[in-house]
Image: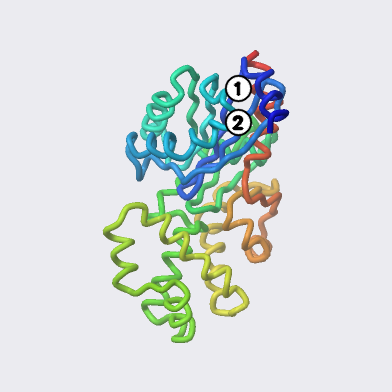
């Protein structure tokens, strides 16, 4: 531990914090001028569903205690936050919370889509997609996002996401579309009821996160043909309502837990829809580390 701390101390004159944030979790990376890094995680941050105060509480209660092990967290000079819900209208909430906690740092907040594109493609042009708690896609020119199909959130859109997969699963189960055996298995495994589900979806905060967690039932029962068909159609809807609009012959890259854990079915759907598929990653953080080490750190020194 001492050696690790000493190495960080030698480079604390420039210390950046990179964040890849979804609605369920945030992957943080603390990086020194030499490119050394250490990772921590907290609950998700999404300004669509959280206030400045709630975001700041997450930072102070969950992030700062983990950064304290390096002692120099207070000397962070730059924060690069890529997050779900960080639209031009909403990202100011995250900027305010980060600036309140990291008072000496320059704060940059952008969409999780830009983070995904930089993490997946670096400086190459192409289509990047997120399939996590939420979903999204964009055409990236190697530097910035040129355009993207709006994701619209889990009520109006977010096809391909964990929240919508969970929503569709629960809806089909409660409306007796998947058989009594799967319905009974679901209620037994999650120790829940229809009344409890309705309460958490319609009355409690962060229903998208709740629904995304329920989608794990699909992974646990993916060998059941009815579940396989549901997940397959889930991806087809994402492809038809989003990806076909890009009209690209470049391989399409994916990041996120839903893309990663259901990779064979995603590949099956992409092949059936005659679209080229590129890399599929669970998390863009390694790509974001490389991007910031090679392209951002040199501009800050």
Point out residue 173 in the picture as x, y percentages from the top left corner: 42, 77
Based on the displayed image, in which of its 4 quarters is residue 7 positioned?
top right
The residue that disc 2 covers is: 30
- Classify mark 1: helix, strand or loop: strand
User: Could you tell me if the residues under marks 2 and 1 are in contact, i.e. CB atoms within 8 Å?
Assistant: yes
Residue visible at 30% across and 56% down in the picture: 204
**Do we see residue 257 in this rendering?**
yes
Quadrant in the picture for residue 140: top right
Tag 2's secondary structure? strand
Q: Quadrant of the N terminus?
A: top right
Q: Residue at x 42, y 24 (%)?
A: 99
Q: Quadrant of the C terminus?
A: top right
Residue 154 picture quarter:
bottom left
Residue 81 place in picture, x, y as percent = 51, 32
Q: Between marks 2 and 1, how big is the CA–CA gap? A: 7 Å
Instruction: Indicate left or right for 200 with 169 as reference.
Output: left
């Amino acid at each position: 531990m001492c050696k690790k701390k000493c190495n960080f101390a030698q480079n604390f004159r420039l210390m950046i914090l990179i964040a890849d944030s979804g609605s369920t979790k945030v992957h943080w990376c603390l990086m020194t001028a030499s490119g050394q890094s250490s990772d921590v995680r907290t609950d998700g941050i999404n300004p669509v569903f959280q206030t400045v105060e709630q975001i700041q509480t997450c930072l102070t209660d969950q992030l700062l205690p983990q950064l304290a092990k390096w002692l120099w967290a207070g000397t962070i000079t730059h924060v690069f936050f890529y997050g779900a819900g960080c639209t031009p209208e909403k990202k100011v909430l995250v900027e305010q919370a980060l600036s309140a906690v990291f008072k000496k740092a320059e704060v940059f907040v952008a969409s999780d889509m830009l983070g995904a594109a930089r993490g997946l493609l670096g400086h190459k042009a192409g289509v990047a997609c997120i399939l996590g708690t939420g979903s999204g896609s964009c055409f990236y020119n190697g530097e910035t996002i040129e355009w993207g199909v709006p994701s619209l959130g889990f009520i109006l859109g977010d096809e391909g996401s964990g929240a919508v997969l969970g929503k569709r699963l629960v809806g089909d189960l409660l409306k007796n579309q998947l058989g009594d055996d799967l319905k009974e298995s679901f209620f037994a495994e999650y120790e829940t009821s229809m009344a409890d589900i309705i309460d958490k979806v319609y009355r409690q905060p962060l229903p998208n996160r709740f629904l995304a967690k329920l989608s794990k039932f699909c992974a646990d029962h993916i060998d059941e043909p009815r579940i396989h068909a549901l997940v397959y159609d889930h991806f087809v809807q994402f492809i038809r309502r989003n990806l076909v609009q890009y009209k690209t012959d470049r391989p399409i890259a994916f990041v996120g837990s839903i893309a990663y854990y259901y990779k064979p079915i995603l590949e099956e759907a992409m092949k059936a829809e005659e679209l080229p598929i590129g890399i599929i990653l669970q998390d863009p953080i390694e790509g974001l580390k490389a991007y910031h080490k090679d392209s951002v750190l040199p501009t800050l020194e």
